Image (cartoon, rainbow, N blue to C red):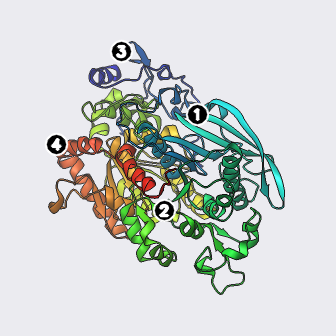
Amino acid sequence: MECALVGNLSNTCFLNSISWRVVRQRKTRMLYSSANFNAPPLFAHSNPPIERTLAVFGSEEFVWPSPADEIPFWKNTFPSRDARIQVPTDIEKDSNPIHIIHVTAEMAPIAKVGGLGDVVTGLARACLSRGHAVDVMLPFYECIEKQQINDLALITEYNTFYDGSWVPTNAYRGVVSGIPVIFIEPSNEFFKGQNVYGGSYNELEAYLFFSRACLEWMQVAGVQPDIIHVHEWQTGALPLLYWDMYQNLSLQKPRVVFSIHNMEHFGECRKDQLSKCGLDGSIYANVDKAMDDRTIGHNPERLSLLKGGIVYSNAVVTVSPTYLKETLCSGWLASTLLRNREKYFGILNGIDTVIWDPANDVFLPANFHAQKPEGKKICKYYVQRGLGLVSDGSLAGDPVPYITDNVPLIVCITRLVAQKGLHLITQAIKHTEELGGQMIVLGKAYDDRVQGEFEDLANSHNQGSSIRILLMYSEELSHMLYAAADMVLVPSIYEPCGLAQMIGMRYGAVPVVRKTGGLADTVFDMDDSSNREMANGFVFEGIDEGSLNCALDRAFRHYREKTDEWNSIVQKVMEIDNSWNNTAGKYIETYNSIRVRW
């Protein structure tokens, strides 16, 4: 029966020609979160578990995963994704090429913690494909896996000033996912550790060092880009350093664009800390420069690298039109943004449709797209089997069509922080179970209290057959979950842009979101009769559990009672163009509006 199911589907779905499908079977139990679980049979009458047999996709062998596997299915050996990633050559080239250098703390996939890494990689590749010259400058974190970098080579040995002395620094060049990257490696303790963030060094001072080191390298190497595009508070000091130091030296051509990905990250900085990178911190301690308005009148008063970056950059971009409006209307930076309104733009993020491509994704057991969606059913069942949401023996009793087709699977892939609506995620777990659905939460908590609460939830739910709470982050598993999901939940209290809803749609998962920021710009309610043409998901506005419940109730009814309409929604969301190529043109317009033509 197992082979029959797969055989019927394999006639119409796309399949990866990759060897990782031959999965080694193990009999030991594996850890998914803080809680171990052995999933019980979904049905009391299920036959005893059967041996997992090999199903054949064309000439290849395939093994369904199981919670009993020693190696979790998302940790199998996959083919190199980087080998498949090429900068598209069929995109129409822009007439006036620009040289852009991105200065950033994150870049996907080698140094990714959140959406910032995805944005940098996607925007860089989109601009390359349009004929522009692009480099990314990134700290050479100790945790970066060097095998993910192609053509890595030392290009410059130089010194960077910091805290009264010159620090020997190396610059390496390599290629990551088709994008040229310059890695900055200091000889001190900065950027050492097993993670991108959270090393034993002072993080703020490390990024102050990095901001100056990038400009110093440009000067030493004689590189004069048209645009220096800096991202988030970590590089907020660079505009100050550029205009008050390096622009008076040899770097005179570049203009600076500052991207704000999340206004809640302030970059709070003492005057003496800013002074360590060679600037006089006291000069910036006024409201028209970098004074943190929240600390005015306090002892001591502080600076904000976020505010300084806004004031000193030639253009400021945030990641969605709605978030721009929200930040102009409320928050401690609203007055600063209003004073700089003429250079403040809201440009919706895109997604990297090379990395996020269900038709070619190397992490999926079966590929699919809008015109041939059948492989999505295999992905759903694959994840259900691997996480124990359906037992190994289920096929003997033939419940698979019921589980796969009639039980909606919701995924929520997120950082477990207050911004993401933790109480709503908890409620969604409860209500999904009440509605007879299945839900998978994948995310890391950065607060001990939140970690404890979700560990308790995992201990309570991971033994059952409907909920899995996985307290970790896995790039591979996130791809599989998007492919498996019927719905993707994004219940954020605020969300500058949000990528999960766009990635989910790309993979055929219908979004259920709270109306805020970029979520409001990308998801439009199915039951809004005034906007049928744009309708593509389920939207709620309140921050209370009842508002979420109503949205889930409506989504479940559509899934179960309006099958044809649901299938149409799935196809529709997969065909929506949320690619970076679609939005990169707006960045190019911004770059051109401030560049200096020599």
Q: CA distance from mark 4 to mark 2?
A: 47 Å
Q: Earlier in the sequence, mark 1 or mark 3?
A: 3
**Badge 1 amino acid:** Val
Q: CA distance from mark 1 to mark 3?
A: 35 Å
**Badge 4 amino acid:** Asp
* Residue pictured at 52% horizontal, 42% vertical: 134
Residue 38 appearing in the image: no
Check disc 4 and report the residue beneath it: 564
Residues tagged 1 and 3 counted as in contact (Cβ below 8 A):
no
**Badge 3 amino acid:** Gly
**With respect to residue 325, does 120 lie above or below?**
above
Residue 223 appearing in the image: yes
Helix, strand or loop under label 2? strand
Check disc 1 and report the residue beneath it: 175
Residue 447 on image: x %, y %: 61, 62
Residue 280 on image: x %, y %: 74, 71
Check disc 2 and report the residue beneath it: 315
In this rendered view, identify the residue nearer to me: 263 or 18: 263
Residues tagged 2 and 3 counted as in contact (Cβ below 8 A):
no
